[in-house]
Image: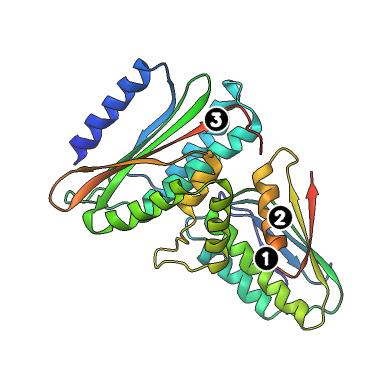
Amino acid sequence: MSSLILAEGKNTPEVIFNISENIFTIKGKSFPENAKKFYSDILDWLDDFTPSNDLNFDIELYYISSSSIISVLEIIRRLDKINANGNSISVNWHYDSDDEDLKKIGEDYKRISNISINLIAN
Amino acid sequence: MVNNFNNRFVELEEEFSRTGFEVIQAKKGPWTQEDVEGFAYELETILPEKGVKKGIIKRIFSLIIEALQNIRLHGESGNEGEQSSFYFIAKDDDIFRIVTANIIHKDVIEKVQTRVDKINSLDRVGLKTFYMETLTDGQRSSKGGAGLGFITVAMKAKSNLDYSFEPLDGSYFRFEMSCDLKLKKEEE
């Protein structure tokens, strides 16, 4: 399986799922008009992903639109599913220390998923 | 329809000026997705110059993206084939007022009104519950929306969504919505 690398766009985040270096990050802004379309490649990639060791997904978004919030939840649910098969993935949810909204989004994900989510204030 | 929107635009400009508001940004549609991004990034330049704090700027940025994408997705083109619309961001000493307007077909008025009335009827806890239900339901419409737009606007503004429907012709109405965002942080 090859890594998934997407460069940051004007309204989409940088995505690095680098298998050989064990780096998994989604970073930047996320407010594409069609979030479902943008995130479909990422979700497809995760459907085929079988990790061989424990790993962390780092999500660090500066802006996130409501439709992207749903797409990121779908990513977290995919990771939940991978964990259910005996793996150990956790998510680091990074947010600006003065951004209550982003902190709350991380708390919401924590509440509705089984995966371990660490809230990290930058 | 274009005239109706232009007249209302001028009327609102005058109303803001008369009531002591400073208009920070006002644009008439139709807009492309690139326009929407451009307006939002423009705010990142304008608002710091007005001494607005980062937290409020991020919130207004998100509100505008949410509101304008909503209009692009759901705004009708009407009989003239143009997605007539506008928005205002205005500020006085205490609040930011955001007003948006777009064309809506008479057949969807009841649905929109029911949804906004429900949002307005909920207190903060109830609104959060409704948000979580909609989020976990995750059903997307054919246009890619997920029903979180109005809820997100109400939650970010922490205010009711005032609205009106003004008839344009037999089938179409001007849907105007406004919300206020307080400049001072409320107790959570």
Badge 1 amino acid: Ile
Can residue A31 be seen here? The reply is no
**What residue is shown with label 3?**
B182
Residue B133: quadrant of the picture: bottom right
- Nearest to the observer: residue A49 or residue B118: B118
Q: Secondary structure at mark 3?
A: strand
Vertical relation: A3 (above or below) A118: below
User: Where is residue A107 drawn, in percent x and y?
Assistant: 71, 55
User: Marks 2 and 3, how far apart in space?
Assistant: 24 Å
State the residue position of label 1. A112
- Looking at the picture, tell me which residue is in the foreground, B70 or B180: B180
Q: Residue at x 29, y 56 (%)?
A: B110
Judge the density around disc 1: few (<14), some (14-19), many (≥20) Cα neighbours within 10 Å: some
- In three-dimensional space, the C-alpha distance between marks 3 and 1, rounded to whole angstroms, equals 30 Å
Mark drawn on residue A16:
none
Chain under callout 2: A
Name the kind of residue labelled 2 in the image.
Glu
* Label of residue A107 in the image: 2
Cα–Cα gap, marks 2 and 1? 9 Å
Q: Are marks 3 and 1 in contact (CB under 8 Å)?
A: no
Describe residue B166's horizontal placement relative to residue B89 as left or right: left
Quadrant for the N terminus of chain A, please: bottom right
Pick the front one: B124 or B103? B124
- Taking the spot 58% from the left edge, 39% from the top edge, the residue there is B59
Q: Position of residue A14 (x, y in %)?
A: 67, 56
Q: Position of residue B166 (x, y in %)?
A: 22, 41
Which secondary structure lies at badge 2? helix
